[in-house]
Amino acid sequence: MLVFRPLFDPTSCTWTYLLGDRGEAVLIDPVFEQLRRDETLLRELGLKLAWTLETHVHADHVTAAWLLRQRLGSRIALSVDSGASGADRLLRDGDRIAFGSRHLQVRATPGHTSGCLSYLLDDESRVFTGDCLLIRGCGRTDFQQGDAAALYRSVHMQLFTLPGGCRVYPGHDYNGMGVSSIDEERRFNPRLGGDVGERDFAGFMQHLGLPHPKRIDQAVPANLRCGRPEGELQPPADPQWADLSFTLAGSWDITPHALAEVQPQVQIIDVREPEEFGQGLGHIEGARLLPLGQLEARAAELARDRPIVTVCRSGARSARAAAILAKAGFEQVANLRGGMLRWRAEGGAVVGAGE
């Protein structure tokens, strides 16, 4: 069964797409700053990342392809016409990228840049168009070897010839729309659909008057080396005070075993109610009771130079507590995964149980 997850980066309005089958996955257009998110999702879904695929050399964000290769052993693929170095495979029109029992067909769709590709799923149910075709729009053609005439032909010859029901998944969206269809874009795209001709389109694109992307001077050189960090561009540093795991909620979790190893060095904040703290499951020795409803108002009572582990019965309330503390500027915060239930199940010592 195909696994499909669209993933959004709000800073650059970039869509990353995860596709998986039989334990293997590909990521289309991964974003540097979303490395932890993508790693976490792959782990949770039990998928091994086989390939990262670029639709083009991006000017508005840096790819996470190089970092993912270093950390997960995936391979990098992008257009032979991209001008990039460091890829494992340079793709041409008609090539295939396999994952599990499925594959993506490569379609060369230059125009936004000279090395733009679209990726068509094997059953022609989905196409990933990068910046070539956006929902009711398209990528600009005024830099990076952009060519309005080439873009028009790419869309009309390589994309608009697909089945009308084929769903279109763009590289970016700025208007809150995540998916369209070939039929919709053929009919309603104001730049490329309906009766718009090549000269109409070229004239439109010549007068967009858009500023250059803010990160172009950093993003393009980095993407020409497949996202390999240099200078100020460095991967996010993982916490060193304990063995932690990142969650899709954007926070850090700690297991009971990992907490036991650092217990004397951290602040354990139990956010349950007083009656839960003093009886029933009991509490961890050295834990401080600070009910969730009081946490935000009393956060100043906590030391900022010592890591904090938040605790509740199951890990749900304490996950919210960790988010509150992170928002308040505490940089070393983790949630006890599974809460007191898991702590007790794994043999953790408690105080006050059953009293």
Image (spheres, rainbow, N blue to C red):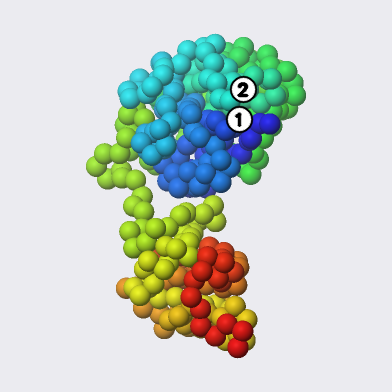
Q: Which is nearer the N-term, disc 1 or disc 2?
A: 1
Q: Nearer the viewer, residue 192 or 279?
A: 279
Q: Which mark is residue 304?
A: none
The x, y position of residue 189, in whole percent, is 67, 27
Residue 81 visible in the snapshot: yes
> Measuring 36% from the left and 58% from the top, which residue is drawn there?
239
The x, y position of residue 285, in whole percent, is 45, 80
- Kindly identify the amino acid type of the residue bearing the numbered disc 1: Arg
> Measuring 60% from the left and 39% from the top, which residue is drawn there?
6
Q: Nearer the viewer, residue 211 or 22?
A: 22
Quarter of the picture containing the N terminus is top right
According to the picture, the residue beneath numbered tag 2 turns out to be 101
Label 1 secondary element? loop
Q: Is residue 92 left or right of residue 273?
A: left
According to the picture, the residue beneath numbered tag 1 turns out to be 22
Q: Nearer the viewer, residue 285 or 58?
A: 285
